[in-house]
Image (tube, helix red, strand yellow):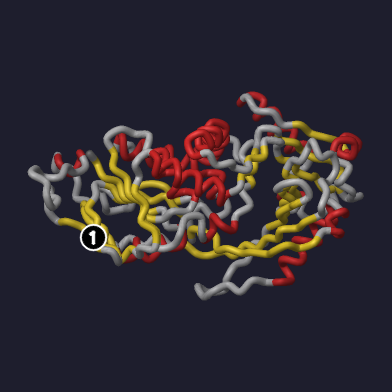
Amino acid sequence: MSHVVIIGCGVVGATIAYELSNVQGLEITVVDQQPPAQASTGAALGVLMGIISQKTKGKAWQMRQTSIQRYETLIPELEAITGRKILFNRQGILMLLPEPSTPYLERDGGISEWEKLQEIRQSQGFSLEIWDKAKLKQICPQVDNDKIVGAVYSRCDRQVDPTALTLALVDAAQHHGVTFKFGVQVLGIEPHPLPSVEREGDTEPHSLSPSYERGESSEKYCYQLETTQGKITADWFVVAAGLGSSLLTAQLGQMTDIRPVLGQALHLRLGYSLGNPEFQPVITGNDVHIVPVGTGDYWIGATVEFSSNKDEIPPNKELLESVKQQAIAFCPDLAKATTMRTWSGLRPRPEGRPAPVIGKLPGYSNILLATGHYRNGILLAPATADAIREMIVHNDF
């Protein structure tokens, strides 16, 4: 039986653990110095912008497609195993389109660009609707802004509560026999210079990767994780530690540079539903999301705050207020809402390379990276887990 150790239990690590728990012949251990669903997962809004994304081909699109499709089966699967209720908004995402004079038009794309995307998505089997101002006003009267000329509605996109999802993934994985070690700090991964190692208590050498056994690889093979609660021997190590990935990979001489980007959000309580209570999609525009989370409650976010250096990023109150005011500009009734709480978290953004970082750590035959998802950790978690599973089961790098 192969032993897989996953470092990190945000949504990505938890999803990998659960998906691997469905593979026969694997023993799985997850290690995290914090409880599950902390850091960037706990700060996320869970908006799954897959179909409405401008990504149309290649790996970037394939990962979105894989994840959006998997979520349709994953959520009921987890609820059945755990008995937990996961808030999963199936009413789609509505992206507001500004008039041409608005500065952010080029980023969100004009009507013609959306018509092109609509054709592509139709050929891929997904629906995108382009609404003019009259249709938007009829279906979503809560949107009241003269500078909005219409909207794009993606009925296939979703929103999920990141914390509820992650806790359900942990419960379901435990139900399948996965071991979780929380409050345990990882100190390092130990390379082994020999082509085989013996575990304590084993009567035969522990198997290595096929290329290593054939003598075809000069890569290092790691066999042991050192933690504050002792050492853990394993066949595979999956680094899904977000910002913590940099230090761990640096210790192995292959630095994966992950930088923090702060995001802030608000929980507003209005007391009644915006517009039609029976139709409550996520509304987004100018990179601001209005997320319904129960009758009369809305999450608003999020800021994008960079650091000029690697030091801690203090939350910028003015930026958060500007996000709130943008949401109010879209849906004026939100001005009457009470702020229940504000929160923030650091997103892991790879430096000098696209997000996310998924694959084998250079120079090592059995260390896999699943990190640096930046703002798309919730969206891409299922596709990331699928990729890691293929690497482990089929040695498909």
Q: How many marks?
A: 1
Q: Label 1 crowding class (10 Å Cα cut-off): few <14, some 14-19, many 20+?
A: some
- Residue in front for this viewpoint, 242 or 17: 17
Across and down, in percent, residue 46 comes to 61, 48
The reply to whether residue 57 is in sight is: no
SS category of the residue bearing label 1: strand
* Left or right, residue 61 beside residue 368: right
* Left or right, residue 144 beside residue 126: right
The C terminus is located in which quarter?
A: top left
Which residue is found at the position 69% from the left and 28% from the top? 127
Q: Judge whether 108 appears above or below 310 on screen.
A: above
* Label 1 sits on residue: 231
The reply to whether residue 159 is in sight is: yes
Which residue is found at the position 34% from the left and 39% from the top? 391
Which residue is found at the position 67% from the left and 60% from the top? 265
Across and down, in percent, residue 36 comes to 47, 55
The N terminus is located in which quarter?
A: top left
Q: Quadrant of residue 2?
A: top left
Q: Disc 1 residue type?
A: Lys
- Residue in front for this viewpoint, 295 or 125: 295
